[in-house]
Image (spheres, rainbow, N blue to C red):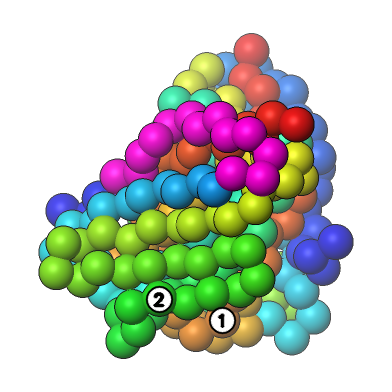
Amino acid sequence: DSGVTQTPKHLITATGQRVTLRCSPRSGDLSVYWYQQSLDQGLQFLIHYYNGEERAKGNILERFSAQQFPDLHSELNLSSLELGDSALYFCASSVASLVDRNEQFFGPGTRLTVL
Amino acid sequence: GENVEQHPSTLSVQEGDSAVIKCTYSDSASNYFPWYKQELGKRPQLIIDIRSNVGEKKDQRIAVTLNKTAKHFSLHITETQPEDSAVYFCASRYGNKLVFGAGTILRVKS
């Protein structure tokens, strides 16, 4: 157990819908990273927050947004869902704001299925 | 661009043999190159990393080598065991994000 929690574990929804994925970082970690893992695209970085502020963006679609709250948990919002959004979504946390300073600890992931 | 190429995509070895996975990166990658292991149905976990001020780093049966001139780094697993079977991802730091390779499925046959 990495200490990072994600809810829900599984999510099944329909095209066009909106969902929210939640992540709670390890105690003491200020950084939260979101990744999308699909069979054909591997592990793709989406976005990074540090202590409530956005620090880096990857290939995140405009239909997706995220935020980090004062208690440091983070939410990833996915809207106007398409079949191709079906994937495993991981969050990871670390202490520092720079990716090379500390190990990123991954949560168990949320499996999203869009029908 | 921000690109990490990883080879091979699958690798089968006999228990006790060595396994080598190689990744190449593009010019804009900077100083940090981690390797993650993901067992089936589980989360990725960091197994070893290397920074560009060293050429090699070892941790028991695992080693990583970095060739900055050729812009590639490799993971070496010696005396492979069935529990080494997993997907291995390399990554490179670009700015303040990690870009991952496509992954290598390692199967250790007993």
Q: Amino acid at mark 2?
A: Glu
Residue B9 forms part of the magenta stretch: yes
Q: Nearer the viewer, residue A8 or B67?
A: B67
The answer for which chain carries disc 1 is: A
Q: Residues within 10 Å of mark 1 (few under 14, many from 20)?
A: few
> Which of the 4 image quadrants contains residue A105?
bottom right
Position of B97 with respect to B80 (left or right) is: left
Q: Which residue is mark 1?
A: A102
Q: Which residues are magenta?
A: B5-17
Q: Residue at point 73% right, 56% down?
A: A107
Residue B90 forms part of the magenta stretch: no
Q: In this view of the protein, can residue A56 be seen by the observer?
A: no
Label 1 with label 2: CB-CB less than 8 Å: no
Q: Residues within 10 Å of mark 2 (few under 14, many from 20)?
A: some
Instruction: Tell me: residue B51, above or below residue A43.
Output: below
Residue B65 location in percent, x, y? 38, 68
Instruction: Tell me: residue A94, above or below residue B53.
Output: above
Q: Amino acid at mark 1?
A: Asn
Instruction: Tell me: residue A35, above or below residue B72.
Output: above
Q: Nearer the viewer, residue A55 or A103?
A: A103
Position of A24 with respect to A50 (left or right) is: right
Q: Are marks 1 and 2 on the same chain?
A: no
Q: State how far apart marks 1 and 2 are (Cα).
A: 19 Å
Q: Residue at point 58% right, 64% down?
A: B62
Q: In this view of the protein, can residue A95 be seen by the observer?
A: yes
Q: Which residue is mark 2?
A: B56
Residue A96 location in percent, x, y? 55, 85
Residue A8 location in percent, x, y? 81, 42
